[in-house]
Image (cartoon, coloured by chain):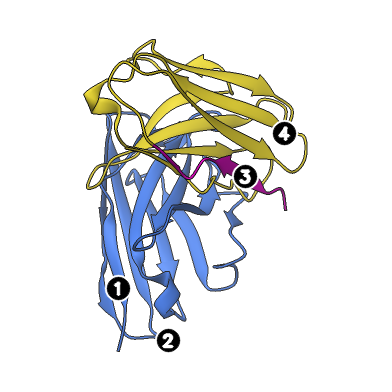
Chain colours: A blue, B yellow
Amino acid sequence: EVQLLESGGGLVQPGKSLRLSCATSGFTFSHYAMAWVRQAPGRGLEWVSSIGNSGSTPFYANSVKGRFTISRDNSKNTLYLQMSSLRAEDTALYYCAKDTSSWYDYWGQGTQVTVAS
Amino acid sequence: DIQMTQSPSSLSASVGDRVTITCRASQVISDFLNWYQHKPGKAPKLLIYGATSLQSGVPSRFSGRGSGTDFTLTISNVQPEDFATYYCQKTFTTPYTFGQGTKLE
């Protein structure tokens, strides 16, 4: 059974940093690209970042470019999102998703990030 | 960046109805268009990928059509469990933008 479990969310002050993790199981992690998607309160889904199966070719939404870094550890079957210079508008539920040939067929339950002083 | 315009933003329906949601891209995206269902407190669920392919396990009352710039998601014979928010997403080039969402109520 494919499982994705996000962790690392919490309450953080503006300007601070936070690292999210997404632990996976049930599939060969190193064979698939992965992605982060978020949903701010009362808003729709927003694609945040994607990374290729080997860790190359990271892509970012303009709203997070230069502040967020996506990475992965294929030996640990885990995806990461390092978030820095956090802003109030980064407050959202963050999902990780498995990318199968340009569609997201499995998603985690999400981890909440709240940026407030 | 390619913009995705999804309509309507909300849709009222009854059990047994047939409903259609539209997604339009500002440029040609071939068939790199996916549809998801999202319920509060749940992970989004893939319904349709590649514009027309039904994801395994998804009921056949869901169907997708289109190519190029204009796409539709149709739910025939709406069931109680279908009341949710639906999103299109393009994956032709980054950013892999989602549409604004359509709340089926």
The verdict on residue B16 being magenta is no
Of residues B44 and A24, the one nearer the viewer is B44
- Left or right: residue A60 versus residue A98 is right
Q: Does the magenta stretch include residue B6?
A: yes
At label 1, counting other C-alpha atoms closer than 10 Å, the crowd grade (few under 14, some 14-19, many 20 or more) is many
What's the amino acid at mark 4? Ile
The secondary structure type at the circle numbered 1 is strand
Q: What residue type is labelled 1?
A: Thr
Q: Is mark 2 on a helix, strand or loop?
A: loop
- Image mark 2: chain: A
User: Is any part of residue A104 visible from this angle?
Assistant: no
Q: Is mark 4 on a helix, strand or loop?
A: loop
Of B6 and B87, which appears nearest the observer?
B6
Position of residue B30 relative to residue B54, above or below, is below
**Which of pointers 2 and 1 lies earlier in the amino acid sequence?**
2
Q: Which mark is residue B29?
A: 4
